[in-house]
Image (spheres, rainbow, N blue to C red):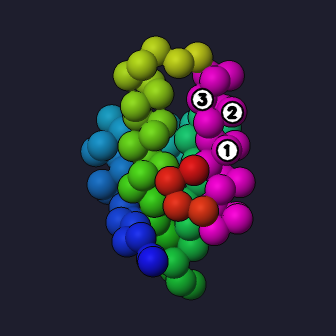
Amino acid sequence: MTTLRHMLRKPAVMKAYGRSHASVYVDIKRGVFPPPVRMGMKASAWPEDEVAAVIDARIAGRTDDEIRELVSTLIEARKAGRVGG
């Protein structure tokens, strides 16, 4: 059975995450936000469940180190083709 995943484009990510374009990419570089998925030559988007997981971790008061671990887990799950981490 295939699980439908929703993809968020950058404006929706910035709105949900509450950060600017530059801040999102700084957080990606710091390892506290997952990188986007290439959708085509000029398009990229983020899996909604990954964005939600990071936001939930922030709300729960997780440290940056804990969020880095979460992001690492999300990226590994993405590479392995697992949905939802």
Residue at point 42% right, 19% down? Answer: 60
The magenta stretch is 64-81
The image's mark for residue 83 is none
Q: Tell me which amino acid carries mark 3.
A: Ile
Tell me which amino acid carries mark 2.
Glu
Q: Is residue 62 above or below residue 16?
A: above
Residue hosting label 2: 69
Q: Residues within 10 Å of mark 1 (few under 14, many from 20)?
A: some
Q: Which numbered marker is on residue 67?
A: 3
Q: Does residue 22 show up?
A: no
Left or right position of 84 against 35: left
Q: Does the magenta stretch include residue 72?
A: yes
**Left of 59 or right of it: where is 34?**
right
- Check disc 2: other Cα within 10 Å, few if <14, some if 14-19, many if 20+: some
Q: Can you say which quadrant of the picture contains the N terminus?
A: bottom left
N-terminal label among 1 and 3:
3
Q: Name the residue under label 1.
A: 73
Give residue 10's position: percent from left, percent from top: 39, 58
In which quadrant of the rendered view does residue 79 lie?
bottom right
Q: How far apart are marks 1 and 3 (CA)?
A: 10 Å
Q: Please, what secondary structure does the residue beneath circle 2 have?
A: helix
Assess disc 3: are there few (<14), some (14-19) or many (≥20) residues with their C-alpha within 10 Å of its C-alpha: many
What amino acid is at disc 1?
Answer: Thr
Marks 2 and 1 close (CB-CB < 8 Å): yes
Q: How far apart are marks 2 and 1 (CA)?
A: 6 Å
Mark 1 lies on a secondary structure that is: helix
**Residue 7 seen in the figure:** yes
Contact between marks 3 and 2 (CB within 8 A): the answer is yes
